[in-house]
Image: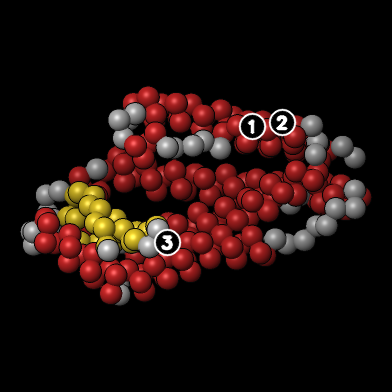
Amino acid sequence: MNHYRAILKQIGIVLIAMGILDLMYMVYRVSTDGSNASDRSYSSPGILIVVVGVYLIRGSLRTANIVRWIAAFWIANGIGSILMRSFSTPIALLTLEFRLEPSGFSMWYLSKIVETAVAYWIYRQLSAAPVMSASRNSNLAVYLPKQAFFLGAGFTVLMPILFYITGDGLLGKKAVTLARAKYGTSYNYHVTALRWSSGNVSANITAYNDKEIKLVRVELK
């Protein structure tokens, strides 16, 4: 009858380990790249992950249902991220990234694959019959988390499509024009982000040629 608790305990231990590793990574990242403002602003969800793991070890079925929903979201999000980076980034830029920074390029894909695999494992474990039966007996709603899958896919597919439309439109073209005026025509330019703040628009652009890649930011008035 209590077999579901063994499943929850196993997942809880894994989550606690993941949370501790994430906290350690945050400390490492801030200490080694503290001069970079974007790295200093890095925040770790490690503490929250550890707390969730503790609740699962204690046998919380309500927490298990929430984690199952998040795992479903993360499966779709992970697969979508891999596909969108692979197909929305120019082939020449992907090839150059792999040639100049093979370890960083490979680690991004490897980390996404591992994250998605772990999310799939957690989802399958929390969808096992003992957990589902115990949830029903506790009067908790048990259903296929379609919304989580749709939202996870939406964040990585619909948003990039919307960005592609705007990035390839007037704002994107203006941003590329400004970047080209500053850094010259020896680079190719790929808009990676558009941000709106207080009526101003800024764009993050990757400038690249056969020898180097640099990140460029331009302000659109």
* Residue sitting nearer the eye, 172 or 28: 172
Residue 193 left/right relative to 142: left
Residue 157's x, y, as percent?
A: 47, 66
- The amino acid sitting under disc 1 is Val
Q: Which part of the image, by quadrant, shows the C terminus? A: bottom left
* Residue sitting nearer the eye, 195 or 153: 195
Comes first in the chain, label 3 or label 1: 1
Q: Are marks 2 and 1 in contact (CB under 8 Å)?
A: yes
Q: Residues within 10 Å of mark 1 (few under 14, many from 20)?
A: many
Q: Which part of the image, by quadrant, shows the N terminus? A: top right
* Residue sitting nearer the eye, 67 or 91: 67
Q: Are marks 3 and 1 in contact (CB under 8 Å)?
A: no
Estimate the spatial distance between the alpha carbons at disc 3 and disc 1, rounded to whole Å. 30 Å
Residue 102 left/right relative to 185: right
**SS assignment at label 3:** helix
Residue drawn at x 42%, y 70% as measured from the top left: 161
Can you say whether 157 is above or below 123 in the image?
A: below
**SS assignment at label 1:** helix
Estimate the spatial distance between the alpha carbons at disc 3 and disc 2, rounded to whole Å. 34 Å
Residue drawn at x 49%, y 37% as measured from the top left: 43
Residue 129 left/right relative to 1: left
- Residue behind mark 1: 50
- Residue behind mark 3: 83
Q: Residues within 10 Å of mark 3 (few under 14, many from 20)?
A: few
Can you say whether 59 is above or below 31 in the image?
A: below
- The amino acid sitting under disc 2 is Val
Front of the two marks 3 and 1: 1
- Residue behind mark 2: 54
